[in-house]
Amino acid sequence: MNEDALLAYPPVFLVADGMGGHDAGDLASRIAVEEFAQLAGQQSATSDDVHACFDRTSARIRTEFTGGRRGGTTVAGVAVTQHDGGWYWLVFNVGDSRVYRWADGELEQVSVDHSVVQELIDAGEITPDGARRHPERHVLTRALGTGEPPEPDYWLLPAGVTDRLLICTDGLTRELGDDDIARVVAAVSDPQDAAAQLVQHALERGGRDNVSAVVVDVATAATPAEQTHVTAPRSAPDLGPHLWDEMLNGATVPRTSSTAPADTAPQPRTTTPDHAQEDPA
């Protein structure tokens, strides 16, 4: 059962890793995508916009999970935002899905896991390598749907023209270390291919959990139009304007122009590999 869901539609990009099994974890992660999808198509999103999505997601999970049924989800992602006249990445996270940034030849994990093993690492009781084998490595300290108000962490990063962002569920980082990830994001220029290779490598290593990855590049005026893509929703007769189906959404279509005025938001190139969404591994 695939309990992952993802959204890649400017100005917001995220993954959600549901918990609770069939008709619980998959529903919780889908709710997160539906609520954040209400930002799709805006030029940018504020921190208030993003936090409102967290609030609505949490409230819907509490409302829709009745009769003793329990479910929850992690959410990690990034939104394009404006601050003091400049363009920034607003990184957000609840749980142990992650956001990485590749810039200046280095891979940096921006988000911090909300997990028992991360607290042990911070306390100096175990090493990051030890955390990968710790028996409580999947125990979260924060998630949406637990009954507590959402407590996302936020980071504000200047958006550089050479930035590459990776947003992924722990199905990827459980199988691949930072060095493995860095080799792919450094060597593979096309974001679609980079995401596909990361997912494939994780599956080859065992694929013990659902694997979802979104890779976002900033498109510049030097990028050929035919190579610049943005995800767009496919139509479905039973879906409303903000109800996304991971089996239907995720098609990429070329932009009409590769150039953008200097005062417009950075235009991302995005990827949502279909097999990452659909593969039950």
Image (cartoon, helix red, strand yellow):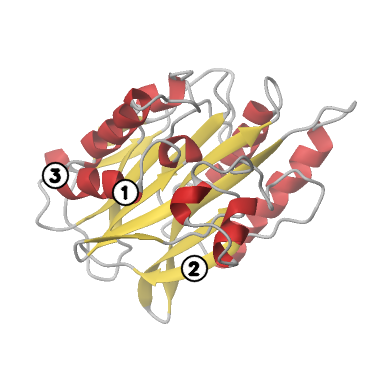
Q: CA distance from mark 2 to mark 3?
A: 31 Å
- Marks 2 and 3: which is nearer the front? 2
Q: Tag 1: Cα neighbours inside 10 Å, few (<14), some, or many (≥20)?
A: many
**263 shown above or below 69:** below
Q: Position of residue 260 (x, y in %)?
A: 21, 60
Dot 2 falls on a residue whose secondary structure is strand
**219 shown above or below 272:** below
* Residue drawn where x is 47% and y is 40% of the image: 7
Q: Which residue is mark 1?
A: 216
- Marks 1 and 3: which is nearer the front? 1
Q: Amino acid at mark 3?
A: Ala
Q: Is residue 4 left or right of residue 152?
A: left
Q: Which image quarter holds the N terminus?
A: top right
- Quadrant assignment, res 64: top right
Among the two numbered marks 1 and 3 on one chain, the one whose residue lies closer to the N terminus: 1
Q: Which residue is mark 2?
A: 155
Q: Position of residue 237 (x, y in %)?
A: 54, 17
